Amino acid sequence: MKKRSLFLLLTALLLTLALLPSAAAATETPALPTGNWLEHTEAVSETNGVYEIESAEQLAWIAKQTALLKTNFSGKTIRLTKDLDLSSHLWTPIGHSDMAFAGSFDGQGHTVKGLTITDDAHAGDYVGLFGYARGGSLQNVTLAEAYINVTAAEYVGSLVGFASSINNCHVSGSTVKGSGNYIGGLVGDALMGSIVGCSADKVTVTNDDDGFSYTGGLVGSLNNAALAFCRAGNVTVIGANRYIGGLVGSTNNSVSNCDIINSVVTGTQSGTSYLGGFAGAFSSMAKVANCKVENVNLTAKEYINVGGFCGQHQGSIVNSVAIVSQFSGNGFLGGLVGKNEGSITNCYAHVESENLWYGIAYQSSGTVLNGYYNNTATADFSSNSGRAFDCKAMTDDEMKADAFVAALNGYWDEATETNKYPYWAKDTANQNGGFPILEIPKVSSLDVIAPSFMGGTIHFQFRGENLDKVSALSISDPHMGSYSSLADAKVEDASRITASFTPHDGFWTKGETGYSCSGTVYLTLDGLRTAYPFSAFIPLEVKTPKVTSLSYADTLPSSGGVAEILLSGEHLASFHDTVTLTAVSSSETLRVTKAVQEGDSLRMRLALPDNIGESDKVYRLSVTLGSTEQTLPVYTLTVKAPVQGEVSSPFDLNGDGQVNVNDVIHLIRIIVGEA
C-alpha cells in the first residue's frame, strides 16, 4: 500500500511539473513591474555641463524632464557612474516627438538591466531607453535583460527608437517586440550619422506589422547612416513584412567589417518581402564590404525573395561571405542575394538546403565578379539579364583548400595594383565548418588616457581584433578634423592601435573642478573612416610641471657631438608626458623628445652636426612640456668654427683637423647611435 501511495504521489508531481511553463517561456515574458519610473525620481544637479547619474531614480529624473517638456539637454552630457537596475517599474523613454533628447549620453562602460516598456508605459511612437535622440551621441552602455512589448509604436529598439550617432553600445539577453515601421534589437532607425562598435547577443526581435516595415537583429533601418564594426550573435529575428535581416532591415549607406553568427531569421508572411541573413535590402547607395553571415538559419513563406546575405540588393557588396546552415520554406533563395540589381565582387556562399536554391542570386540584372558557391545549387541564377564573370560552383573540398583562400585574397585593386582584401584565412580551428574565414580588422572600443597636467598629451588606444592585418592606417588630428593626420599613429599588435594628441591650451575648458577637453578623432583603416567622440579631464588640484633652468656645457668643438642637457624645475619627478628640446640656429632647427628621469630632473641628449663654416654656429635652446612652452632665460649653445690650419677632408669625421684612428672611432659611435 505504501509503494502504491508513493507511486501515485510521484505521478502527480510529474504531471504538475509538466504543466508548468518552461524556463525559456518564463524568460521571454518576465513578471512585469508595476508603476512608472516617472513617479520615482531623484533630482540631479549639473556640474560643468555634466549630469552624473548613480541611481535609477536619477536617470528617471532625466526622462521626466523631457516628458514634461522642461529641457532637451542640448549641449549637456548625461554620464553613468554605476550599473543601474530598472526592473522595479515601467520605463518612459528619454526624449519623444515633442521634445527630442539633444544632449550626449556616456554610459562609461556600465550596464543598465531590467528595462521594461509595455503599452502601459504610454511611451508614444519612439520606444527604448531613449525614445527620440537628435544631436549629440549615445555611447558606452550595455542593455541587459530588457523586455519591450508595444503594439502602437513606430520606432522601437532597446537602446533607442530613433537616433543618429551611436558608439560602443550593446544589448544582451533581451526581447524587443513591436508592430511598427522600424524595429531593431538595439536601434529602431538611424538617420544621418553612424553606428560603430555595437552588438546584439541572445536577443529576440519580433515585428508583427504586415505593412511596409523594417526589422533587424541590431538595427531596423539605416537612413544615410553608416554601420561599422558591429556584430549580432545568437539572435532570433521574426518579421512579417517587408525588409527583414539578421543584422539590419535595410540600409542606403556604407556597411563595413560587420557580421552575424549563430542566428535565425524568419519571414512569416508571403508576398513581396525581402529577407536576408545579414540584411533585408541594400539600396543603390549602399556600399558593403568585409562582412559575413555565419551559421544562420533562414525560413521564408512563399514568394519571398531570400538571400543568404541579402534579400534585395541594388548597391555594391565586396569581399563578403554567407554561410547558411539551413534554409526552409518556399521562398526564392539565392546563396548571396535573392534579387540582385547591383554589383557583387569577390564573395562566396555555402548553403545547406533540401530545397531548390541558386548559387549567386535567384534573379540578377546586375554585375557579378568572382562569385563562388557550393555545387549543391541548381545553377548560378534562375534568371540573369546582367553580367557575370568568373562565377564558379565548387565542391566542399575545393572550398576548404588553400587554393581557394589564395583566390579570395588574390583579388587586386587595378587602380593601385595592390592586394585589396588580404583578410581571408584558412579555417584551421573549424569555426566555420572548414570554409575560409574573414579575419576582419575590428575596433571594439577606444580608451582615452588624459594627460597628467594642463597642456599635456592625450593618448588614444583603439582596442579590437585582427588589427595587425591593416595595411593603411591614419588617425586625424581633432583640431583639423579629417584634414590632418596624427603622425605617431601605429598598430602595436593584433588587438591595439595607439596614437597621441597634444591640444593647445585653448582647446581645454576650465570648470569648477578641473579642465576638460573633448572632440572627435577619425580612424581610417584601409580606407574605412570611422568617427569616435572622446573626452579627457584634468582635476584642478593636479600640480603642473615646470622647467626653470638648463645645465650643460655651452660650447662644443667644430666637430660637434652630443650635448648632455639637464632640465631642472618643479614637479618633474612624476612627469611622464611629451617633452621637446629645440635648438635653432640661423640655418637649421634640431629637436629631440627622448628624456631620462633623474630624480626631479630630466636628462636629454642633443646631437649637433659639425661646423664647416667660417664663424661659430650658435643655437638658441627652448623647452616645451606637452603643448606648453616653458618660460626660460636665454640659453645658447655654440659649435665653434674650425681653427686656422685644420685640414678640410671628407675623412676628417670628428672635425679635429686630422685624419687618424679617432675618425674611425667617431664613425663607430655614429653607427651605434652614440654620436
Image (cartoon, grey):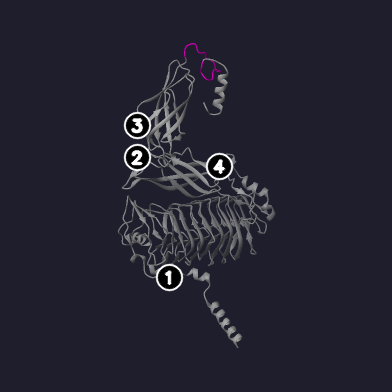
Say what secondary structure mark 2 lies in: helix
Helix, strand or loop status at disc 1: loop
**The furthest residue to the bottom:** 1
**Residue 471, which numbered label?**
4
Residue bounds of the magenta highlight:
643-656
What's the distance in space between the residues labelled 3 and 4, CA to CA? 42 Å
Q: Amino acid at mark 3?
A: Thr
Q: CA distance from mark 2 to mark 1?
A: 51 Å
Q: Earlier in the sequence, mark 4 or mark 2?
A: 4
Residue 32 numbered mark, or none: 1
Q: Disc 4 vs disc 2: which is toward the camera?
A: 2
Kindly check if marks 2 and 3 are in contact, taking CB atoms under 8 A apart as contact.
Answer: no
Which class describes the residues within 10 Å of circle 1: few (<14), some (14-19), or many (20+)? some
Residue 479, position as x, y percentages in the image: 40, 40
Give x and y (percent) for residue 438: 59, 51
- The Cα–Cα distance between marks 2 and 3, rounded to whole angstroms, is 18 Å
Q: Mark 2 or mark 1: which comes first in sequence?
A: 1
Are the residues at dot 1 and dot 3 in contact (C-beta closer than 8 Å)? no
| Foreground label between 1 and 3 | 3
**Tag 4 near tag 2, CB within 8 Å:** no
